[in-house]
């Protein structure tokens, strides 16, 4: 048991010594960025507004067209909405990557990781990313 403790302490000391002076690692909580950044909320509002518009258009023509045509229109609308969502997610991912890269360079971070379970902590740059995604 004593040797196990000594071994663990030695490994911990080696890892700590190896990190002295090394640039820190940044961490971004993407879920928080999605929930709090102005840009992500703007994109979500665009999606919500388009979906409401589609629902209103479908309701307006529901009594004027047959069921097959209404189903086809609904399917087209869902496809369009899905494509719009993918496009906006892609734009947000590019912007997030750009901003995280800028923050990493400014803070001389070695790397930026997506927040998740990790053994060693990193510098959380989530708020800085949110602030810049306006």
Image (tube, rainbow, N blue to C red):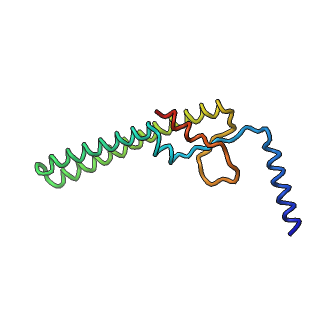
Q: In which quadrant of the rendered view does residue 110 lie?
A: top right
Query: Which x, y percent locates residue 39?
Result: 44, 36
Q: How many marks?
A: 0
Q: Which quarter of the figure is the N terminus placed in?
A: bottom right
Q: Is residue 109 left or right of residue 32?
A: right
Q: Which residue is drawn at 29% across and 41% down?
A: 50
Q: Is residue 106 toward the left or the right of residue 39 in the image?
A: right
- The spot of residue 11 in percent (x, y) is 83, 55
**Residue 93 place in picture, x, y as percent:** 50, 39
Furthest residue to the bottom? 1
At horizontal 55% and vertical 46% (from top left) the residue drawn is: 29
Residue 66 to residue 97: above or below: below
Side of 4 where 31 appears, left or right: left
Side (left or right) of 44 relative to 120: left
Residue at x 56%, y 41% (from the top left corner): 126
Decide which of 1, 60 is in the foreground and name it. 1
- Residue occupying image coordinates x 59% and y 31%: 102
> Residue 20: image x %, image y %?
80, 41
Of 133 and 83, the residue lying toward us: 133
């Amino acid at each position: 048991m004593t040797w196990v403790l000594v071994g663990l302490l030695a490994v911990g000391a080696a890892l700590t010594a190896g990190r002295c002076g090394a640039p820190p690692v940044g961490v971004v909580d993407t879920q928080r960025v999605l929930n709090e950044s102005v840009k992500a909320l703007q994109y979500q509002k665009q999606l919500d507004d388009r979906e409401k518009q589609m629902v209103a258009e479908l309701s307006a023509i529901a009594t004027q067209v047959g069921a097959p045509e209404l189903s086809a229109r609904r399917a087209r609308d869902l496809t369009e909405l899905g494509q719009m969502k993918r496009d906006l997610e892609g734009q947000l991912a590019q912007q997030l990557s750009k901003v995280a890269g800028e923050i990493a360079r400014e803070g001389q971070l070695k790397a930026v990781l997506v927040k998740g379970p990790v053994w060693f902590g990193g510098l959380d740059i989530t708020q800085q990313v949110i602030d810049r995604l306006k």
